[in-house]
Image (spheres, coloured by chain):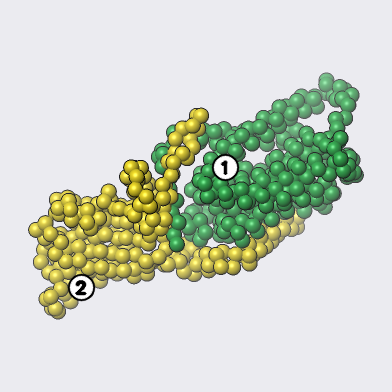
Chain colours: A green, B yellow
Amino acid sequence: MNIYLPIAELSMNGFLLIALGLVSGFISGMFGVGGGFVMTPLLVFAGIPPIIAVGTQSCQMVGTTISGALTHYRKRMIDIRMGLVVITGSFIGTFGGVILFNWLKRVGMIDLTINFGYMVLLTSVGGIMIFESWRAINRTRPLRAAKAPKRPKRLPLGANWPFQVNFPVSNLRTSFFSPMLIGLLCGVMVAIFGVGGGFILVPAMLYLLRMPVNLVNGTALFKVVFTTGFTAILQAAITHNVDVVLAFFLLLGSVVGAQFGTKYAQKLKPEMARFLLAVLILAVAGKLFYDLAATPPSLYTHEMRYP
Amino acid sequence: MTRLAILLIAILLPFPTHSQDLVADISSHEVQVTTGFTGANLIVFGSMERSGDIAIVVEGPTARATVRQKSRMMGIWVNTDSYIFDDVPGYYAVASSKPVADMLSPATIANKKLTLDKVDFPVRKNDARAETFRQALIQRRQYRGFYSQQPGGVTVQSGHLFRSAFALPANVPMGPYNVYVYLIRDGHIQSMQKVVFSVDEIGLSATIFEAAKNYSVLYAFASLLMAIAMGGGSAWLFRRMS
């Protein structure tokens, strides 16, 4: 079943797109992330121009994450106040990121930035997570369990900064600026890499803000819905990179995959889920590194701009 | 359809005006890109009064092309140089009944751009790099199926009827196309006929393309609404099912 994608201006197999959606949706539901960091490289690999892949992704992720976010909301597993502060920072970051994206596109550095920056980001986030989750897995073993509570509670990032705010749901107190700064960085990532920022936000909320584990996934999804929604509007209205037909077929798969992912996640220990997510992140980073280092089939690329 | 057309021409041609040495037409004057479009085949066919050779050029709408060159920097491949060409045809295909070098002088081949390496693009500023980038561009277009050269791609039947097929890929550029049919005898171009056609987006994909360009804010909210509806819908459905 071949489908012509009017904005990407090429034709692709519809079943393949639905299958891609299923995979990324499953990952999204399982780990509380948007799934964009897996989907964007897959779409580019399938032949979609990177900028269209990034733009369309943002639209598709709104649909994928909204169902997960609704489920978490019903179970009261979202720190709304924390989420709103992160979102505020993220909006500012996204806006700056879109401007940066267009500038990089003009000077021809967009492919490099997407690939290289992404690789560095994935490697560092994946590396930290795999290290931490491995330790957490070992800590939960009964022998060492007694040691765990003795460790002093570590302070969140920004505990000494001005503008201290209480976050009662997460039971912590920190500066308004620390979640805002994290949101800002995520927002830039959202605009440039076409990811929701969930896979950065999940470890950032855990290790930097020291939020309770059970609130992290829901709050990240809550944030991803808003930022990807905002990016989707900007990408469609300003940069014209959203292919609605492509988004539709991806969504057909991803909204179903997300439901199965959420179900499966409940059977998994949180540290085990983080460990698996870290492995997945590092695998994507490895693929990107290979693409950058391996000699390309042609040293030349070209783009055509029709009047 | 095409065979019928050739047959009709074969029947009709011997009788009317003897002044026309070459008559050519194409299978479709409008190639329609719909939601199910996966590429198309364009048939160029016709008849010549006395036997000769045929060369056909199909040229698509022009665009500004930016060619970028990668080189290795600190172990990774980075775009290091680029070149801009104006008025580059998005599609360029040549087919002939014999290799053109066997039929025409190099000057004529260059003048009529009958081989891919003779396809020339206006250069913004003259420098030595232009030639390297021009060849790279032609090679990349060829690789993607937008440029092609088929020596022997025109079949001639009984010395009078000729026919050739051109593949238009799924992502063929939209716009006006020109088809030049050359009749060649004794090392010279004896006559030429130009036929035009266009590739147009129609139906749903055209509507979407237009909406995305002209009503981008509306398009943005509509696509967002679709995503929300699909996500919320599936969550609701799964909750009811379990």
Residue at label 1?
A114
As rendered, which of A291 and B31 lies closer to the eye?
A: A291
Chain assignment, label 1 = A
Rendered position, B140 above or below A269: below
Q: Amino acid at mark 2?
A: Ile
- Quadrant of the rendering where the N terminus of chain B is positioned: bottom left
Q: For this view, does B111 lie left or right of residue A158?
A: left
Residue at label 2?
B9
Q: For this view, does B193 lie left or right of residue A124?
A: left
Chain assignment, label 2 = B
Residue drawn 74% across and 28% down?
A: A132
Q: Position of residue A229 (x, y in %)?
A: 69, 55
- Residue A195 makes an appearance in the image: yes
Q: For this view, does A61 lie left or right of residue B37?
A: right
Rendered position, B19 above or below A77: below
Circle 1 packing at 10 Å, graded few (<14), some (14-19), many (20+), is many
Q: Quadrant of residue A156?
A: top right
Rendered position, B26 above or below B112: below
Residue drawn 30% across and 56% down?
A: B93
